[in-house]
Image (cartoon, rainbow, N blue to C red):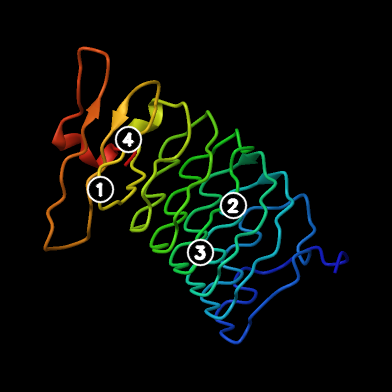
Amino acid sequence: PTTITTINTYAFANCTGLTSVNRDMLPATTLTGSCYARMFLNCTSLTNAPNLPASYVYGFGYGQMFKGCTSLATAPVISATGTGTQSFIEMFAGCTSLTTPPDLSNISGLGYECYAGMFGGCTSLTTLPALSQTIAPGCYRAMFQGCTSLTTAPQSDLESPLKHSMHLQSPQWISHPFRKNQIGAGLQKNGPPDPVRPVIVVRESPQTCLDAADNQRRLF
């Protein structure tokens, strides 16, 4: 209802019998920090999500909002153009049925770790969002860690995100036109049997690659 002015975190957390929600149940365009944090945490039967029309997401505003929603197949429409600290952190982590992410191309103002772990463990995710042309410290950290079904890189013209660690995990080498750069991403796992291979970035400049010791600060 439009008369509701506040809502607690964990509002529907662990409601395992919740199967669907009204797409327009969250009409607010102005939010406070942590406003919708963990709202649907571990709602394992939820298959859809409400749209999110807020223009700016303050710190932890959508943090872990749908984490553990293993039946969620459709992502919400996100209208935000700016974010605060950790605004989207682990928003869809563990959503193993999610195949397509929301459009993030209109978000140009990024806060610290705003996308950290956003799609971690989304093993059915097969496509990636378009990303904005700005970054902030840690903003892409582990964004796609454990997304084992991904085979393409995110579409962006940025070179600087190479210093971040999206941990895009793929069973094959992939290429991506970061201003004619080629990015190889080896299969990364949390344990044996396959070792983690260093990520090689081939550039047109004399410095042809990043060394293996710097591997934790990679985009992929």
Q: Secondary structure at mark 1?
A: loop
Q: Considering only vertical position in the picture, is 157 above or below 5?
A: above
Mark pair 3, 2: CA separation: 10 Å
As drawn, is 79 to the left or to the right of 176?
right
Residue kind at label 1, given as amino acid type: Gln
Residue kind at label 3, given as amino acid type: Leu
- Residue position marked by numbered label 1 in the rendering: 172
Residue kind at label 4, given as amino acid type: Ser
- Residue position marked by numbered label 3 in the rendering: 98
Q: Considering only vertical position in the picture, is 98 above or below 127?
A: below
Mark pair 1, 2: CA separation: 25 Å
Query: What residue is rendered at 63% in x and 39% in y?
Result: 82
Q: Secondary structure at mark 2?
A: loop
Tell me which corner region of the image, top left, top right, bottom left or bottom right, holds residue 164: top left
Mark pair 1, 4: CA separation: 10 Å
- Residue position marked by numbered label 2 in the rendering: 102
Of 90 and 47, the residue lying toward us:
47
Query: What residue is rendered at 36% in x and 44% in y?
Result: 166
Of 214 and 30, the residue lying toward us:
214
- Residue position marked by numbered label 4 in the rendering: 175
